[in-house]
Amino acid sequence: MPNINLTNRIIEIHLSSWRYFAALSLPPIMLAFACLPLREVAALCILFLVTHYYCWRLWLDERLFQLLNEESNLAEFDHGMAYLWGAASGKTRSMSKRWHGVRRLFYRAILALLALWVVSLCLVLYVSYRLG
């Protein structure tokens, strides 16, 4: 059984990378507004919003894992979350399931950021090729 507090701290450190993801999402959108027609900018804005949704989720999970490190009763934590989101209190999830969910969320955030960069660079190259 892994050390739960240590694993939670490691997860918190990785979740704090939402700041870098948010900062790294700015150059592609600024490049798009500077170089692309409005139709292409709209497509990139959707990817930008998806990336920032994942940044918000990483930020939220960072705070929630700080709370989980201080709380010993997972059932009370799950009950509080269910009360906030209006869901029925169900079965309490284990820490390993929570870690798995965070890992999946982290990878989705990385993929959203990469997609934003790749699509923005491809669109800029396409528009410059079309104009040239």
Image (cartoon, helix red, strand yellow):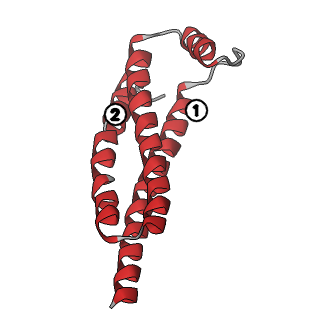
107 sits left or right of 132 in the view: right
How far across and down, in percent of the image, does residue 118 sit?
40, 68
* Residue 41 position by quadrant: bottom left
Q: Quadrant of the C terminus?
A: bottom left
Question: In the image, what residue occupies the spot 53% across and 26% down?
Answer: 95
Q: Nearer the viewer, residue 125 or 89?
A: 125
Residue 27, quarter of picture: bottom left
Q: Which residue sits at x=72%, y=16%? A: 88
For disc 2, the neighbor class at 10 Å (few under 14, some 14 to 19, many from 20) is few
- Say which residue label 1 marks: 97
Image height of 81 relative to 95, above or below: above
Q: Position of residue 46 (x, y in %)?
A: 49, 54
Could you tell me which secondary element the residue under label 2 belongs to?
A: helix
In the image: residue 31, left or right of residue 89: left
Mark 2 = which residue? 10
Q: Amino acid at mark 1?
A: Lys
What residue is at 44 percent from the left and 18 percent from the top?
Answer: 68
